[in-house]
Image (spheres, rainbow, N blue to C red):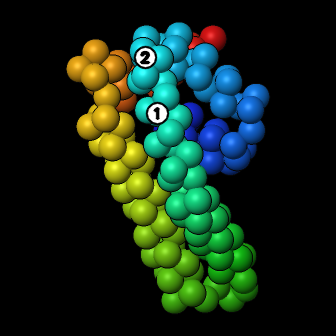
Amino acid sequence: MLAALLLLAVQAGPTVGNEAQARQALARGGLSAKGVDTVIATVKRRQPQMRQLLERLRQSALAAKAAGARRPVDVAAFDAALTAQQGAVTAVARAQQALLIEQLRAASPADQAVLLKRYVEPPARAAARGR
C-alpha cells in the first residue's frame, strides 16, 4: 500500500487532487492527522530521487527489451541490460525502505502500528480495503 501511494505520488507529481486522495486513503487506513502529514511530507521530500530512480528503471527495461529484440541476439548486451535493470530495481527497493524507516522514526507508536500493518498486509487485501 505504501509503495503504491509512493508510486502514485512520484508519478503524478505534487498535484492537489492526488495529495487529497492520498490523505483521505491514509486517514481511512487509521493514520492520525500528524501521521498523514508525516507520510505526505516524506514522500514529497523524496519525489525527485524517486523520479530519477523510476526513470533509471524505465530506461534499463527499455534497454533489455531492445537488446533482446536484436537478431542475432547480443547476449553480452542483453546481460548488461538485465544487470542494469536489476540494479535499478534494487535502488528503488532501497529508496522505499529508507522512506518507510524515515516515516516510522517520525511517527507516533500508534501510527507506527498502522504503517507496519500496511507494510505486512498482502497487497490484494490492502487494495480491497482501500475501496
Can residue 120 be seen in this snapshot? Answer: no
Q: Is residue 126 left or right of residue 55?
A: left
Question: Relative to the observer, which residue lies in front, 104 or 59?
Answer: 104
- 120 to 85, vertically: above or below: above
Badges 2 and 1: C-beta atoms under 8 Å apart?
yes
Task: Give how far across and how far down residue 101 sits, in percent.
Answer: 30, 42
Residue pointed to by mark 1: 39
Q: Amino acid at mark 2?
A: Leu
Can residue 107 be seen in this snapshot? Answer: yes
- Quadrant position of the C terminus in the picture: top right
Q: Residue at x 43, y 16 (%)?
A: 31
Residue at disc 1, secondary structure: helix
Compare marks 2 and 1 and give the one earlier in the sequence: 2
Residue pointed to by mark 2: 31
Q: Residues within 10 Å of mark 2 (few under 14, many from 20)?
A: many
Q: Give me the disc on residue 11.
A: none
Q: Quadrant of residue 6?
A: top right
As measured in the structure, the alpha-carbon distance from the residue carrying label 2 to the one carrying label 1 is 9 Å
Q: Residue at x 56, y 45 (%)?
A: 44
- 55 to 27, vertically: above or below: below
Question: Relative to the observer, which residue lies in front, 12 or 33?
Answer: 33
Q: Quadrant of residue 63?
A: bottom right
Q: Amino acid at mark 1?
A: Val
Count up the numbered dots: 2
Q: Is residue 39 left or right of residue 108?
A: right
Task: Give how far across and how far down residue 68 sits, in percent.
Answer: 65, 75
